[in-house]
Image (tube, rainbow, N blue to C red):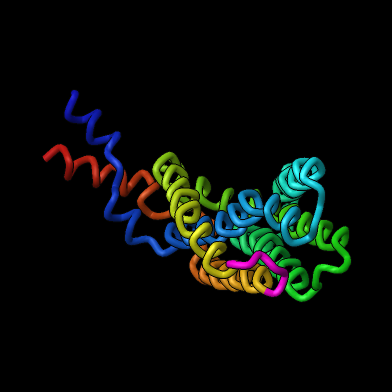
Amino acid sequence: MNSSKRALQAIPYAAILSTPAIWAVWIASIGNFTCVNMMFLFSPKYLSTVLGFAVHKTGFTAALPPLAQFLSKLIFGMMSDRIKFISEKNKFRLFNSIAFLGSAIFLTVLAFMGDSHKNWNMIVLGCAAGILGATTGGFFKAGPVISKQYSHFVTGNISLGITITMLVVPFIVHSLTPHNIQDEWKWVFLVVAVVMVITNIIFLIFIRGEPCEWTKDEFVRSHTMASVK
């Protein structure tokens, strides 16, 4: 009985790791958290050093992008659940593209705005962060849907995207902004925008809208029998 329980609980690592749709979710998480970590970790520095906001105001202004993203997550989450006239696969594609391409567009605009209208810079930065809330109907939702009973493994590894980008993003920002001027930050915004476009393209190509084969009863039974033997 114990061996049977262990077999039933076994995660089909090889099958999961050989599924392109799973890698699409993980790669999308890297794109998402590249942008999130850049904005949430370094927006106070950009707002105070480059745009010249007073230090006592920077905390409030830096809190606006996360707040905007929180609110948009609620809105896009409800929209994703209520839209029934398109397939799940296309909903994943739609919401992920709204988030990634929308944020990339705002970051590109921010890159070429200059620093003479700092309030507009702050608004555009907030929009770039806020629209990322659409990921709640994109890769964040796709992971559990396609992995079903193994979603704890698939979604758990999204945290690797957070860890990797927390290590890489500071290196990119510090390398590109030695003097902390707008012309240098332009390249930070453009690099992040390119990363988001590329990771979204990969997501669009490989994501699927239905549970993977290794979540189905037939696969689980055959995998269980093989494990018990």
Q: On the rendered image, what quadrant is the C terminus found in?
A: top left
The boundaries of the magenta stretch are 178-183
Provide the major secondary structure of the magenta segment: loop
Residue 17 x %, y %: 33, 57
Query: Where residue 70 appears, x then y in whole percent?
Result: 73, 42
Residue at x 51%, y 63% (from the top left corner): 207
Question: Which quarter of the rendering shows the N terminus?
Answer: top left
Left or right: 35 in relation to 217: right
Residue 154 vs residue 187, the one in the foreground: 187
Which residue does the image show at 79% across and 60% down from the upper left? 51
Q: Is 111 left, or right, of 88 in this rendering? A: right
Q: Does the stretch in magenta take in 218?
A: no
Q: In which image quadrant can residue 173 be found?
A: bottom right
Residue 140: x and y in percent read 57, 49
Q: Is residue 120 left or right of residue 98?
A: right
Q: Nearer the viewer, residue 151 or 39?
A: 39
